[in-house]
Amino acid sequence: MELFVLRHAIAEDQNPSAPGIDRERRLTRDGDSKMRRIAKGMKALKFKFDLILTSPYTRARETADIVAETFHCSKVLKETASLGPGGNPKELLEELKRNHPRCERVMIVGHEPYLSSLISLLLSGHTDISTTMKKGGLCGLNIDELRYGRCATLEWLLTPAQLRSIK
């Protein structure tokens, strides 16, 4: 399996006086514009996706929508609570194995620090490898057999600026 790990693009700042609406924060105009250029860079690299799983939080969903629109694959876009900021990596991996066993090229869209912890878990079996996932950053993992723990090889980690520069 090729696992593409994408952090959501630049979103509105969190309102400290209204913490309950964190899930509703949208991409900024700049975040939307940069994500569209990132998605074009991904398309130029000829990536393909059998499945795009996204956090249900608005900023992640909008990020995933841009990718699905760019790749003309909205039918393979699905939300899962297991990619939310408080999500459970074990549940995510079980969901992938149970509901999408034939998907070979999967993109997940979510949040930090969850994504870095997930990458660390899949690479080492522990969640303490330090990884920087910038907003709009993309990581590529190769997985022979998906399981909770060490099962992946890091293929690449691209910054948003690198992706935007690809024509």
Image (tube, rainbow, N blue to C red):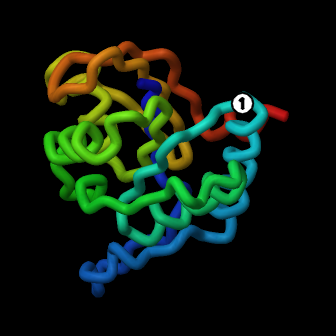
Q: Is residue 2 left or right of residue 18?
A: right
Element class at badge 1: loop
The answer to whether residue 10 is seen in the rendering is yes
Q: Position of residue 132 (x, y in %)?
A: 41, 33
Q: Answer above or below: position of 114 versus 26.
A: above
Seen as rendered, the residue at the extreme bottom is 17
Q: Badge 1: few (under 14), some or many (20 or more) residues near its Cα, within 10 Å?
A: few
Residue at figure coordinates x 57%, y 29% from the top left: 158
Residue for badge 1: 46
Q: Is residue 108 left or right of residue 124?
A: right
Q: Position of residue 166 (x, y in %)?
A: 78, 32
Asked which quadrant contains residue 17, the reply is bottom left
Residue at figure coordinates x 16%, y 23% from the top left: 149
Q: Amino acid at mark 1?
A: Lys
Asked which quadrant contains residue 60, the reply is bottom left
Asked which quadrant contains residue 43, the reply is top right
Residue at figure coordinates x 46%, y 26% from the top left: 2
Q: Is residue 125 left or right of residue 135?
A: left
The answer to whether residue 113 is seen in the rendering is no
Please state which of residues 72 and 142 is positioned toward the viewer in this rendering: 72
Q: Position of residue 72 (x, y in %)?
A: 70, 54
Please state which of residues 106 and 58 is positioned toward the viewer in this rendering: 106
Quarter of the image that includes the C terminus: top right
Quarter of the image that includes the N terminus: top left
